[in-house]
Image (cartoon, helix red, strand yellow):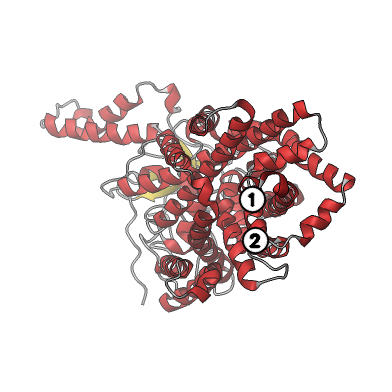
Amino acid sequence: MSVPPPSAAEGVRSGPALEERPDAGQTAAKDVAVTESEAKGTVVADAADAADAADTAATALAATDAAASETLEDYTLRFAPRSYRRWTPMVVATTALGGIAYMADFSIGAGIGLTHGTGNALAAIAVAAAVIFVTGFPLAYYGARYNIDLDLITRGAGFGYYGSVLTSVIFASFTFIFFALEGSIMAQGLKLGLGLPLWLGYLVSTLMVIPLVIYGMKALSKLQVWTTPIWLLLMVGPLLYLVTTDPGTVDRFLSYAGTDGDGGIDTASVLLGAGVCLSLIAQIGEQIDYLRFMPPKTPQNRRSWWTAVVMAGPGWVVLGALKQAIGVFLAVYILAEVGPAAATEPIQQFRGAFDAMLPSWLVIPLAVVLVVISQIKINVTNAYSGSLAWTNSVTRITKHYPGRMVFVLLNLAFALMLMETDMFSILNSILGFYSNCAIAWVVTVATDIIVNKYVLKLSPKTPEFRRGMLFAVNPVGVVAFVAASGLSIAMYFHLLGDALQPYSPVAAALIAFVLTPLTAVLTKGRYYLRRTDDGIAEALLDPDGNPSATTYACHVCRQSFERPDLAACHTHDAMVCSLCLTTDKTGDHLLPPEPATA
């Protein structure tokens, strides 16, 4: 039976916000204990059963209470409602691009350039940027259009409700690996500028982001908007000065052959370098963590909406590739002075650049300011996005919501451990290995959206993420991802021969691209949706194609949510929100599967 939408006269019948109901837990417990006989004035005979029911209700409500504060939890596991998305497209884009201030690009570019030469490095950077842009576009569009994060997109794009736990862990590892990398760079700056030992610098760079990341999008948007102009000035200024005052630096940069190169373009060197750059392909997940707060796309804001999505979605890689090329330039510029080991450190690169244009007393302070601003801008994003990914995974598996802050601290602990074990010294090896998993994941999801949804029409175009609507595991994405990542990692570690090792990122992309539509055809797309009808009469999308803003009350947590975040509950002839479905340990609120069609 479909649940009708609320009439204009009735509006939405829901209780007040939890913040206004300090007795919410007691009320919910009493409601469960009250039976029909009590309503007629009789006394419940079995007090023990009533107490158990009350405890169950109180536990369920406590789980949803943890997610009730939008300021703290920022719609961690769910669709971002229109009522919360009050930023303009350009504010969202600026906030998303603020996270691209990270300094790792300079190290990545420098490492590739010093090893393989400038020509191979620039070719590798260009190849990786093209792949990242093409695969990132459909993901960014879906995140901004349907206001869901990459994990929720992945669920409905070939992986299933529990199958996407695999990719959530991959993405969470991306965030703490790059947090550790950026924290290492900041510690190097603090050592140079303030004399702090590295171990203490690692700790400082970890702890300082906690106050900033607690309050999610509201705090991050202000931080990124205000710090971006300063960061751009400090980054671009010295480069322009060097190029205009000493043109010979450009010639030396372009002619640098590298320690393993001969000055020419070598396919193996290009692919090895591209593999390192492609470790950043998962950055699109962090971009979508912001893009999901885009306002609805309308005829009035169509141009600014698309500009923001392209610029802050796949467009992030344009700035990333430019920074990698600058990293090669600066490393070659300071190589003779500091040596190859230090030339990959951004603090040394910018110290050398500032030294050419500023008084000596100002050089180190400005270099340290640049590094600190960059590290804060990206690591609040790493900590924020990592907490979302861990929370998504653990809540689905345990059906218990522990709160996002628990995973902020967990992510930071992993990052600090990597920093203290000196991961910076083996940076390119870590990123080369990780890129195989990241490429397999992103290419699989992008292929499902582009090919399976729009070409083969085997995958539903409107993304689905709610428990009960999806199968637990969809072989389309899981098979493609496991095969692509497994075989490419075997190639990376020389298990299939030395000659194939440089081609592991190519293998990851090609295998994922081929297997995703092939598996969809073989399974006839039958494992995407467990149900096609969520039991609510009103359409999921409004006439403009945006998620509907009509609100309904969830009968479990007694809060109001917008239409895409709920499904019908046949057991209680009511509606239930996506988080209460996630934490439903008995499956009492799940809709039954639709009968198989012949």
Do the numbered discs 2 and 1 sit on residues whose CB atoms are within 8 Å? yes
Q: Residues within 10 Å of mark 2 (few under 14, many from 20)?
A: few
Judge by depth and name the residue closer to the eye, 123 or 304: 123
Give the image location of residue 164, x and y in percent.
Answer: 42, 57
Q: Quadrant of the C terminus?
A: bottom left
Q: Nearer the viewer, residue 143 or 239?
A: 239
Callout 1: helix, strand or loop? helix
State left or right for residue 311 relative to residue 201: right
Residue drawn 36% across the image and 36% down it: 402
Label 2: state its secondary structure.
loop
- Residue 119 at x, y = what percent? 73, 64
Q: Label 2 vs label 1: CA separation? A: 10 Å
Vertical relation: 1 (above or below) 521: above
Evaluate whether residue 323 shows in this view. yes
Q: Earlier in the sequence, mark 2 or mark 1?
A: 2
Q: Three-letter amino acid code at disc 2? A: Thr
Residue type, mark 1 in image: Pro
Residue occupying the point 43% across, 69% down: 490
Q: Which residue is mark 1?
A: 340
Is 14 in front, or is 356?
356
Q: Which mark is residue 259?
A: 2
- Residue 543, visible in the rendered structure: no
Name the image quarter holding residue 219. Answer: top right
Query: Is residue 369 positioned above or below 237 on the image?
Result: above
Quadrant placement of the N terminus: bottom left
Check disc 1: other Cα within 10 Å, few if <14, some if 14-19, many if 20+.
some
Q: Position of residue 36 (x, y in %)?
A: 21, 34
* Position of residue 50 in the picture relative to residue 155 (left or right): left
Q: Where residue 570 sits: x, y (%)?
A: 33, 50
Residue 363 left/right relative to 516? right
